[in-house]
Image: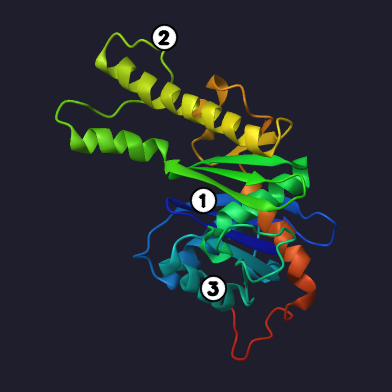
Amino acid sequence: MLLTIDIGNTAVTVGVFRKGSATGRLVTTLRVATDSRRLADEYGILLKNLLEFRGIATTDITAACICSVVPPLTGMFEDLCRRFFGVTPLLVTSQIDLGMPVRYDNPRDVGADRIVDAVAAVELYGAPMIVVDLGTATVFDAVSRDREYLGGAIAPGINLSADALYYNTSQLRRVELVAPAEAVGRNTTTSLQSGIVLGYAGLVEAMVGRFKAEIGEDARVVGTGGLVTVISDHVPVFDDINQELTLVGLDIIYRKNAAGLPSSGASAGMSRAG
């Protein structure tokens, strides 16, 4: 089985794919909080126990693929894969075969998760493509009709914006992230909900419109990320919502590179923990 690990700023998302077919089948997923203070042993035991609870033993894992936007945790999870699962993981960077040209000014500057999402979206839905990822940041990515990653836009995430209001004002408070019945709020709570939820819906709709004007009005739009469901019912731009897009992209990229990788357990001194 293939272990896929997406190390994000808020959460580490893990997926296990069954290998042996043209497209790996996602068997299970799990999420744990991102915490750079944790050690490899802590994350290793946590993942081992969670996977075993889902009926997956460490010996079932024969390969791993990682993308990370948290540098302090990248090497830790590479070490974790070797020690707990006995595999040397493939780390997604601009230097491996992504199956997609990256036209960013400096390809190394692009977050690995952005490229992985784009690869998965084009594989699943075609091109031109716009991916909207609503997580810690709100990220828009564009893929051309020729299946080239072009770049995108980055805005503060919904929670970041809401927290900024809470921490930097005296009288504004945290509110539930749901849309009010009307855009014109009649009290502080609904005013905040309108500005945050409907405001971000407007941001997404406007940015998607601008992207389509540049890459093609027929571009498909896929939403992903932990906060996409907050606004998905309030903005008519999404062709699909796919919360597993990054994991699917890791599976696709791994299969593109698998032939050139060493067999699992090939590294000297490698052993499985516990």
Classify the position of the N terminus by image quarter: bottom right
Q: Which residue is identified by label 3? A: 78
Q: Work out whether 204 lies above or below 152.
A: above
Tell us which disc is closer to us: 2 or 3. 2
Q: Residues within 10 Å of mark 1 (few under 14, many from 20)?
A: some
Among the two numbered marks 2 and 1 on one chain, the one whose residue lies closer to the N terminus? 1
Image coordinates for residue 11, horizontal then vertical, percent: 46, 51
Q: Describe the element under mark 1 as helix, strand or loop.
A: strand
Mark 3 or mark 1, earlier in chain: 1
Q: Is residue 197 above or below residue 267?
A: above
Q: Position of residue 29 (x, y in %)?
A: 61, 50
Could you tell whether 130 is left or right of 11 in the image?
right
**Is disc 3 surrounded by few (<14), some (14 to 19) or many (20+) residues within 10 Å?**
many
**Image depth: mark 2 or mark 1 in front:** 2
Report which quarter residue 268 is drawn in.
bottom right
Q: Which mark is residue 182?
A: 2
Secondary structure beneath dot 2 equals: loop
Q: Is residue 231 above or below residue 257?
A: above
Q: CA distance from mark 2 to mark 3?
A: 48 Å
Q: Of callouts 2 and 3, which one flags the residue occurring earlier in the amino acid sequence?
A: 3
> How far is mark 3 from mark 1, CA to CA?
17 Å
Q: In the structure shown, which secondary structural element does the residue marked by tag 3 occupy?
A: helix
Q: Which residue is mark 1?
A: 31
Q: Residue at x 53, y 28 (%)?
A: 206
